Image (tube, helix red, strand yellow):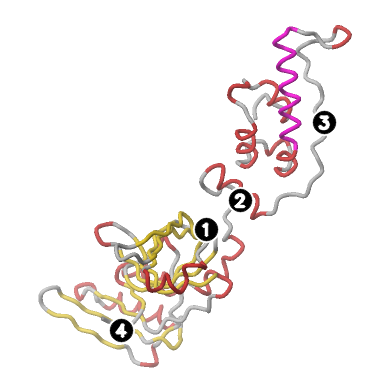
């Protein structure tokens, strides 16, 4: 905080027209005073610091000297911060989000990274068109009625890599609408669409993160440009598939626009465990739009 050495000093020297309890609470939640102490203790000290700061500012404005002729500009020693329990990680991060609009010192999902990898097929940054399972926090939740008078919902799903809009149509809303809550950690199964650059997920199912089953991908379709399908590419794909053996069938989709489309199913001995790691590795080789969960359509 530069020349400030305590919360009390800050409250006594900052222009009172720019400082009130709401501003001070936001600054504490944002971590602006972390060098002065733990946030929960600083938050509990706000009322007293404001009162003492107001008295000192008033004394200075009147030109009063300290008792016994002391220096009127001297800063009295600040009292100890109140002894209160520290904020939990969740409380600290919630305060940052409230004050800043984003998480600063971490993310609520940081503690669930392994769980997220088990129950999702993509993180939000790596979404590709088609079926997906993604996890995150519900934010910006809005419920509204359709022209037919039925309820639906739209919300933003946020993970540690980004955010995406999600749409819950009336049929599904009847099943899960009452369970939708702001800041709830969930896993969404749906279809990602990026038509006209308007990215969104049409939700087909939604469950709390702690209840989500491990992801099972029933098949994997790889779209291959025939002109790129040389020996080096095929050997690289074969190596990646062999490194992740499992039950999911793999399909090669060879397309020459306007001429033909050929679908080849890889033999059973080369089936794979189509988890997030393999999807990411294949997307790096073929491009994100060439790797799709599910069977050919």
Q: Quick check: 94 left or right of 60?
A: left
User: What residue do we see at 54% from left, 70% from top?
Assistant: 208
Is residue 293 part of the magenta span, yes or no? no
User: What residue do we see at 65% from left, 30% from top?
Assistant: 1
Q: Work out whether 47 lies above or below 148.
A: above
Instruction: Look at the magenta stretch and give its main secondary structure.
Output: helix
Q: Which residue is mark 3?
A: 79
Mark whose residue sits in front, 2 or 1:
1
Q: Which residue is mark 2?
A: 93
Determine contact: label 4, label 3, CB under 8 Å: no
Residue nearer the viewer, 168 or 297: 168
Is residue 53 part of the magenta span, yes or no? yes
How far apart are labels 3 and 2 at the CA level?
A: 27 Å
Mark whose residue sits in front, 3 or 1:
1
Task: State which quadrant residue 132 falls in.
Answer: bottom left
Residue 4 visible (yes or no): yes
Q: Which residue is mark 4?
A: 251
How many discs appear?
A: 4
Q: Work out whether 184 lies above or below 224.
A: above
Q: Residues within 10 Å of mark 1 (few under 14, many from 20)?
A: some
How far apart are labels 3 and 1 at the CA level?
A: 38 Å
Q: Identify the element where label 2 is drawn.
A: helix
Task: State which quadrant residue 37 falls in.
Answer: top right
Which region is colored magenta? Answer: 45-63
Mark whose residue sits in front, 4 or 2:
2
């Amino acid at each position: 905080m530069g020349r400030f050495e305590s919360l009390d000093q800050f409250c006594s020297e900052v222009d009172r027209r720019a400082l009130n309890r709401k501003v001070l609470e936001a600054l504490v939640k944002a971590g602006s005073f972390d060098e002065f102490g733990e946030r929960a203790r600083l938050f509990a000290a706000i009322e007293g610091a404001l009162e003492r700061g107001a008295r000192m500012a008033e004394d200075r404005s009147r030109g009063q000297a300290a008792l016994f002729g002391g220096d009127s500009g001297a800063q009295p020693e600040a009292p100890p911060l109140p002894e209160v329990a520290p904020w939990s990680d969740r409380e600290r991060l919630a305060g940052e989000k409230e004050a800043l609009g984003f998480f600063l010192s971490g993310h609520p999902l940081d503690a669930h990274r392994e769980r997220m990898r088990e129950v999702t097929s993509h993180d939000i940054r790596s979404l590709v068109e088609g079926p997906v399972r993604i996890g995150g926090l519900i934010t910006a939740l809005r419920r509204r009625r359709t022209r037919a008078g039925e309820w639906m919902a739209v919300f933003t799903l946020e993970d540690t890599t980004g955010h995406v809009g999600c749409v819950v149509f009336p049929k599904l809303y009847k099943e899960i609408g009452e369970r939708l809550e702001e800041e709830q950690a969930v896993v969404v199964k749906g279809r990602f669409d990026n038509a006209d650059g308007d990215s969104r997920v049409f939700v087909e199912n939604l469950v709390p993160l702690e209840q989500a089953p491990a992801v099972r991908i029933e098949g994997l379709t790889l779209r291959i440009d025939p002109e790129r399908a040389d020996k080096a590419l095929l050997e690289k794909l074969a190596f990646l598939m062999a490194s992740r053996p499992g039950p999911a069938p793999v399909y090669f989709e060879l397309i020459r626009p306007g001429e033909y489309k050929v679908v080849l199913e890889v033999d059973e001995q080369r089936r794979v465990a189509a988890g997030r790691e393999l999807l990411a590795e294949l997307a790096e080789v073929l491009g994100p739009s060439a790797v799709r969960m599910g069977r050919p359509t």
